[in-house]
Image (cartoon, grey):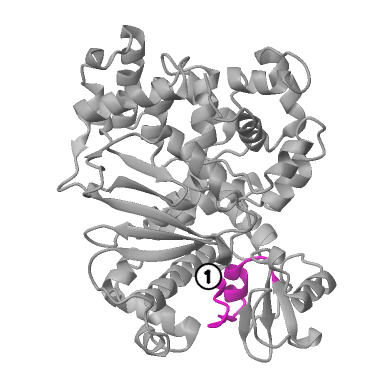
Amino acid sequence: MNDATPMSHDPASCYRALECRDARFDGRFFTAVVTTGIFCRPLCPAPTPKRANCRFYGSAAAAMAAGFRPCLRCRPEAAPRSPAWNGVSTTVARALRLIDEGALDEDGVEALAARLGVGGRHLRRLFADHLGTGPKAVAQARRLLFAKRLVTETDQPLTRIAHAAGFASLRRFNDAFLALYGRPPRALRRDEPPARAHGEGPLTLLLSFRPPYDWPRVMDFLATRAVPGLEMADRDGYRRAIRLDGIAGMLTVRPALERHRLAVTVDLPHIGPLRQVIERCRRLFDLDADCTAIAADLGSDPLLAALVAKRPGLRVPGAWDLFELAVRAVLGQQVSVAAARTFTARLMARLGDPLDGGDGRGISHLFPTPERLAEADLAAIGLTRRRAATVRSLAAVFASGAIDLDAAVGLDDAVARLCALPGIGPWTAHYIAMRGLAHPDAFPSGDLGLMRAVAARERTVDAAGLDARAAAWRPWRAYAAMHLWTSQGTGEQE
């Protein structure tokens, strides 16, 4: 094992947190034990090791790169991940999101660095400084930990698991698994029987988050905007039709809050896109937010203090698909949430692709593709000529790939690119960045609902005044917006 100095975590503080088994530190660091060669989460039920035998790492990838094996009891792959803004640079945060989306499965570090606008050497140095290991090691660690979950939680064939985890072949998967765990995946499956026993059909996995989590408010937000035929939402769960790489299926998300998890059930013809499904779900339900840290920052502002105290686990609900969210944002320009939902439902009824067989519970269509909307006649759904032109123009840009929006694009750059499109202004651009790109600092300052919420507590403001007032809430303006919307009852935007 490598005895190199791990990330800059104070060993004394980490060891005290380890002794307390404090769940609030779950995902913030990992403890490696030199005498066993294993690394664990802070809340692992195993006996606390001696201080002299402990090494502390800021990521599972760093511990694995140092030669330690993941614990089979506490399962480090299930730990909440450190949020992108917690102690890493913006470039590393974007890189991690792209790696989660498979950026290094086929392309190399230089290609990833080019997408981020930096050199490969600089990116490797940033990863070493912030995570204690390199980009390739992070990608390999995440592939292996994801694969291990599928091995132990499902009875899917190992070939499918290798493909879903991003391995080029079963042989490479077996070799990497054996090197890390000291046994082949089949042996681990014998040791830990799968949690479900259906080789085909729906597959369920548990996604972790760091508590608290205000599930009722998140579901109220999604339910208010749920489009008939496409999705259903209430406090018992969320269900919708999905399409990835041309493959259609169903997604169901239910709470398992007492375990700090959400249960995600995916029904697809095969599990090839499963990693994409998981990453999209994490963004949709904002599972990587550290709400305790966010509340501490926002709660220091007199305007937000009472709101934050009332809803400490409030999240920013994301979106399943960026293009879909962008279209829905345009349909919601200068109208109520109810009106935007009506327009979207009409769009779905006329242009949505039928879901083969439906789900028997009212979900019947997939959201239209960019190619279809770019050529569609939208007058029949009640849009103005200008609004219809904006939707078609937006669809054409997405269909051609002329606009490049992903995790590597910063907030200012994303807003600028969106505002360059006909019919899209700052409110729409920030709303898309807030929910579609999961930018924690996006803030639609022209929103009338936000202005009313501020005026009810402090003073009447216009868009410029609200933007100036919100400067104190950076870098969490998206969360401040959610607290203000929620304080108005429906969170309605206009």
Residue nearest the viewer, comparing 24 with 104: 24
**Picture quadrant of residue 204:** bottom left
> Residue at horizontal 36%, vertical 57%?
106
Rendered location of residue 42, percent (x, y): 69, 74
Rendered location of residue 15, percent (x, y): 79, 76
Residue nearest the viewer, comparing 339 with 98: 339
Residue nearest the viewer, comparing 423 with 249: 249
Q: Which residues are magenta?
A: 57-76
> Residue at horizontal 55%, vertical 49%?
215
State the residue position of label 1: 77
Does 54 appear above or below 57? below
Q: Residue furthest top?
A: 385
In the displayed structure, does residue 357 sit left or right of residue 81? left
Quadrant of the snapshot with the N terminus: bottom right
Residue 406 in the magenta stretch? The answer is no
Residue 65 in the magenta stretch? The answer is yes
Rendered location of residue 471, percent (x, y): 74, 27
Rendered location of residue 258, percent (x, y): 57, 64
Q: Is residue 407 visible?
A: no
**Picture quadrant of residue 20:** bottom right
Does 420 appear above or below 318? above
In the displayed structure, does residue 211 sit left or right of residue 293? left
Does 40 appear above or below 477? below
Residue nearest the viewer, comparing 402 with 320: 320
The secondary element bearing badge 1 is classed as helix
